Amino acid sequence: MPPSLHSQAEQFYSCFADLIRAYQFRDRESVCCHDLSVTQCYALEALERVGPMRMGVLAEHLNLEVSSMTRAIEPLVARRLVTRREGEQDRRVREVRITRQGRALVARVQADLVAEYERVLRRIPSASRGAVIETVGHLLRAFEERSACGAAPSEQTSARPTQGRQS
């Protein structure tokens, strides 16, 4: 008899939780080599990919509170990796923009991480690599569709709690 969906979910949870822990700790080690926190690295990548953003939009993009985002951005401003300017109409609005130095640092971080992913992919048979990459894409989309409590959108009730932010 094949394993039940619940049994597979338990196995998937265990394996995936281990993968996430390994990834998070690896990520911290790699990114910190460039004197960036993980949050700062994600902020730089978002600004490089999306372009200038208001501080609140950037915080929302990274699922952070604005105060946490501000604390992460301050050292980047001091290092001239980003600029922050006040809005023309409302001085409380701050727009953050990546600088040329910030772009260069993002490129170095990404090159280091791509090299690490090459080392990981070498351990996977070449015939399976495409399937692994495709599966990770499916996982990402599946996790993006879940609610804060983990229920799929079709399983949610109308009294759905709002998603909290992490610092």
Image (cartoon, rainbow, N blue to C red):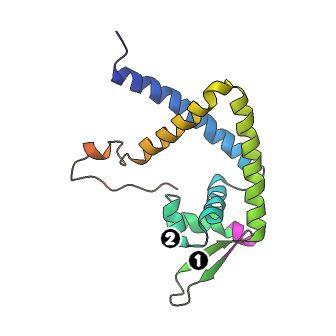
Q: Estimate the x, y position of residue 23 in percent, counting from the top left.
A: 62, 38
The kind of residue on which mark 1 rests is Glu
* Residue 69 left/right relative to 13: right
Visible in this render: residue 35?
no
Q: Estimate the x, y position of residue 157 in percent, counting from the top left.
A: 22, 48
Which residue carries the number 2 mark?
A: 56
Q: Nearer the viewer, residue 128 or 101?
A: 128
Residue pushed farthest left? Answer: 158
79 magenta-colored = yes
The magenta segment is: 75-83
**Would you place residue 114 above or below residue 8 in this image?**
below
Mark 2 and mark 1 lie on one chain; the one further toward the N terminus is 2
The kind of residue on which mark 2 rests is Gly
141 magenta-colored = no
Numbered badge on residue 95: 1
Residue pushed farthest top? Answer: 1
* Residue 154 left/right relative to 26: left
- Please tell me which residue is depicted at 61% across the width and 69% down the height of the picture: 51
- Please tell me which residue is depicted at 73% across the width and 68% down the height of the picture: 81
Picture quarter containing residue 134?
Answer: top right
**Would you place residue 112 above or below residue 53 in this image?**
above
Q: Estimate the x, y position of residue 8 in percent, counting from the top left.
A: 40, 22
Picture quarter containing residue 104?
Answer: bottom right
**Would you place residue 149 above or below residue 73 in this image?**
above
**Would you place residue 44 above or below residue 12 in this image?**
below
Helix, strand or loop under label 2? helix
Helix, strand or loop under label 1? strand
Q: Nearer the viewer, residue 4 or 32?
A: 4
